[in-house]
Image (tube, grey):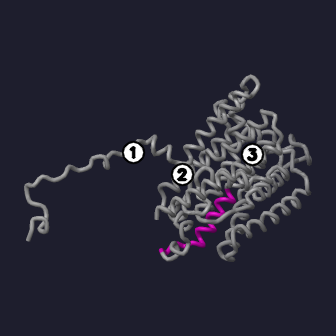
């Protein structure tokens, strides 16, 4: 038998190992390959551009950044909920209706504690009123999400059709409960302590709350079994069921989570303005899906980018604020957000095609 057939000869020289395979890729290089990195850099560029064209560079000021953070807080909560849903391969068009309905219910509970109807100074104990209003708001959001989940998971109805239906139902119920007009006369302390409260005089409290939610979900998606299973469901629901994952239970839990996040955004909205905003959330679903998808969450399911969702939510708000400062019509703002969504979908499609070629 030849030496070649019997294996390597003891003592023979071996080719040196390729140490290049052991050198880890630099952290910066890995980061730059992510969608979140490029969206973050785009945000920086937009801030620089809007600062340059704004009068007296007012865009780059503490007050401007505080307004941006308050604006991002609501959109981020909605986008986080939608990102989790997209990770499992389902969608929610009704998050804006959930926000409005939850805020209306919370506001009506708070207003019921007025000694004189319509008088914001007539609350005997505004703290109790606000607490019970908050509980009612969150409970309404969770119930709304639960209904969505039961329709989608148990009724096995397509999530787009199901949430399109609940979008109309939720909006109609909100108008019925409120009598067709915004519920106002909230206790002034609600704005002072929550909506417009600056922690340390710098960071808005709503921004801290939304970043806290982001941190929790980042840990869930990155380190906990729940996040892994959610993405497994989005990759292949049939395979997840064969692996023993209770898919229907997970879908219901995700819609409830999205509902709670939407209601939290609704309470922040209520505390920011001191009243509900019935007509101000028609495009919430558009903004949320734009933030989630352009941030790197896959539209087809199977992958969630929590940090990317933050930069995607910031992008929409930066565009909105920047165009306002530049004196651009609100109609152009909608067009800009629509173009960003198209770009996000194209990027998502290109990424899907690369994955198909790699298989």
Report the side of 314 relative to 129 (left or right).
left
Residue 352 in picture, x, y percent from top left: 56, 60
Q: Nearer the viewer, mark 2 or mark 1?
A: 1
Q: Name the main secondary structure of what is drawn in magenta.
A: helix
Assess disc 1: are there few (<14), some (14-19) or many (≥20) residues with their C-alpha within 10 Å of its C-alpha. few
Sequence order check: which comes first, mark 2 or mark 1? 1
| Residue at 50%, 43% in the rendered image | 32
| Residue at 88%, 56% in the rendered image | 178
Q: Quadrant of the N terminus?
A: bottom left
| Residue at 71%, 30% in the rendered image | 59
Assess disc 2: are there few (<14), some (14-19) or many (≥20) residues with their C-alpha within 10 Å of its C-alpha. some
| Residue at 41%, 42% in the rendered image | 26
Report the side of 188 relative to 87 (left or right).
right
Say which element carries label 2. Answer: helix
Q: How many marks?
A: 3
Say which element carries label 3. Answer: helix
Q: Residue tagged by mark 1?
A: 25
Q: Is residue 210 magenta?
A: no
Sequence order check: which comes first, mark 3 or mark 1? 1
* Closer to the camera in the image, 192 or 220: 220
Assess disc 3: are there few (<14), some (14-19) or many (≥20) residues with their C-alpha within 10 Å of its C-alpha. some
As measured in the structure, the alpha-carbon distance from the residue carrying label 3 to the one carrying label 2 is 29 Å
Instruction: Indicate whether 176 appears above or below 54.
Output: below
Residue 43 in picture, x, y percent from top left: 63, 39
Q: Residue tagged by mark 3?
A: 336
* Closer to the camera in the image, 20 or 65: 20
Say which element carries label 1. Answer: loop
Sequence order check: which comes first, mark 3 or mark 2? 2
Q: Which residues are magenta?
A: 243-260
Instruction: Indicate whether 130 appears above or below 202.
Output: below
**Label annotation for residue 218:** 2
The image quarter containing residue 73 is top right
């Amino acid at each position: 038998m030849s030496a070649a057939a019997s294996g390597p000869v003891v003592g023979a020289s071996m080719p040196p190992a390729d140490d290049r395979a052991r050198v880890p890729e630099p952290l910066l290089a890995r980061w730059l390959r992510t969608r979140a990195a490029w969206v973050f850099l785009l945000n920086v560029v937009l801030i620089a551009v809007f600062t340059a064209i704004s009068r007296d560079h007012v865009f780059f000021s503490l007050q401007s950044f505080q307004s941006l953070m308050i604006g991002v807080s609501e959109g981020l909560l909605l986008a986080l909920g939608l990102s989790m849903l997209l990770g499992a391969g389902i969608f929610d068009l009704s998050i804006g209706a959930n926000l409005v309905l939850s805020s209306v219910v919370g506001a009506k509970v708070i207003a019921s504690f007025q000694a004189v109807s319509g008088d914001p100074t007539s609350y005997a104990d505004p703290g109790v009123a606000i607490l019970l209003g908050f509980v009612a708001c969150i409970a309404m959001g969770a119930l709304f999400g639960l209904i969505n989940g039961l329709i989608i998971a148990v009724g096995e109805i397509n999530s787009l059709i199901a949430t399109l239906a609940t979008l109309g139902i939720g909006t109609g119920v909100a108008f019925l409960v409120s009598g067709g007009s915004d519920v106002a006369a909230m206790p002034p302390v609600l704005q002072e302590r929550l909506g417009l409260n600056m922690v340390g005089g710098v960071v808005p409290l709503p921004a801290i709350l939304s970043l806290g939610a982001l941190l929790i979900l980042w840990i869930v998606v990155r380190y906990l079994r729940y996040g892994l299973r959610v993405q497994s469901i989005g990759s292949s629901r049939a395979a997840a069921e064969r692996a023993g994952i209770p898919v229907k239970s997970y879908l219901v839990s995700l819609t409830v989570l999205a509902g709670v996040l939407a209601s939290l955004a609704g309470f922040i909205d209520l505390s920011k303005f001191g009243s509900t905003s019935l007509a101000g959330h028609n495009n919430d679903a558009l903004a949320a899906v734009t933030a989630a998808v352009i941030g790197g969450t896959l539209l087809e399911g199977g992958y969630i980018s929590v940090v990317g969702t933050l930069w995607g939510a910031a992008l929409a708000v930066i565009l909105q604020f920047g165009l306002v400062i530049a004196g651009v019509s609100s109609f152009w703002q909608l067009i800009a957000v629509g173009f960003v969504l198209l770009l996000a979908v194209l990027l998502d499609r290109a990424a899907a095609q690369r994955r198909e070629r790699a298989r």
